[in-house]
Amino acid sequence: MGVPVVALAGDSFCARHAVSHLSNVGLADWVARSEAEYVALALARARDLPGLSALRAGLRARVAASPLTDAPRFGRALAAALRDAWRDWCRSDAAG
């Protein structure tokens, strides 16, 4: 929550998870699309000590204010997704 990370976008659960978290706190620019971009981005971020310090100072509050910690919103979205899945299943079962 207090230490930003550089992520490498990819197909694995870990990669998708990191991209999702960074995007939800407004740090999509911390996501690299290739290994070479990852190295360059990590080096650039590590060299910007004042920027890194400023980001770290407000990162916990930023995460707390993000959709990542909005349990009611998550609950509503999950309930809607489950209802949609149930409706789709019922339609496919009735047609099948």
Image (tube, rainbow, N blue to C red):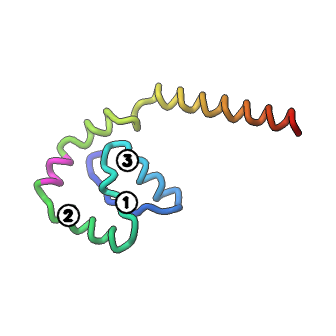
Q: Which of the two discs, 2 and 3, sits closer to the camera?
A: 3
Quarter holding residue 41: bottom left
What residue type is disc 2 on?
A: Ala
What residue sits 39% from the left and 69% below the top? 34
Q: Is residue 91 magenta?
A: no
Front position among marks 1 and 3: 3
Mark sitting earlier along the chain (2/3) = 3
Q: Position of residue 86 (x, y in %)?
A: 72, 32
Whether residue 87 sits left or right of residue 94 in the image: it is left
Q: Which circle's residue, 1 or 3, is located before the other in the chain?
A: 1
Q: Which residues are magenta?
A: 51-56
Chief secondary structure of the magenta portion: helix
- The quadrant of the picture occupied by the C terminus is top right
Local secondary structure at mark 1:
strand
Label 2: which secondary element: helix
| Mark positioned earlier in the residue sequence (2 or 1) | 1
Mark 2, residue position:
46
Residue type highlighted by circle 3: Ser
Question: Marks 2/1: CA distance?
Answer: 14 Å
Residue 53 located left or right of residue 14? left
Instruction: Find disc 1 in the rendering and name its residue.
Output: 7
Label 2 to label 3: alpha-carbon separation = 20 Å
**In 3D space, how far apart are the residues under numbered discs 1 and 3 (Cα atoms)?**
11 Å
- Number of numbered discs visible in the structure rendering: 3
At x 74% / y 35%, what residue is drawn? 88
Q: Residues within 10 Å of mark 1 (few under 14, many from 20)?
A: many
Identify the disc placed on residue 23. 3
Q: Quadrant of the N terminus?
A: top left
Question: In the displayed structure, would residue 84 be above or below residue 55?
Answer: above
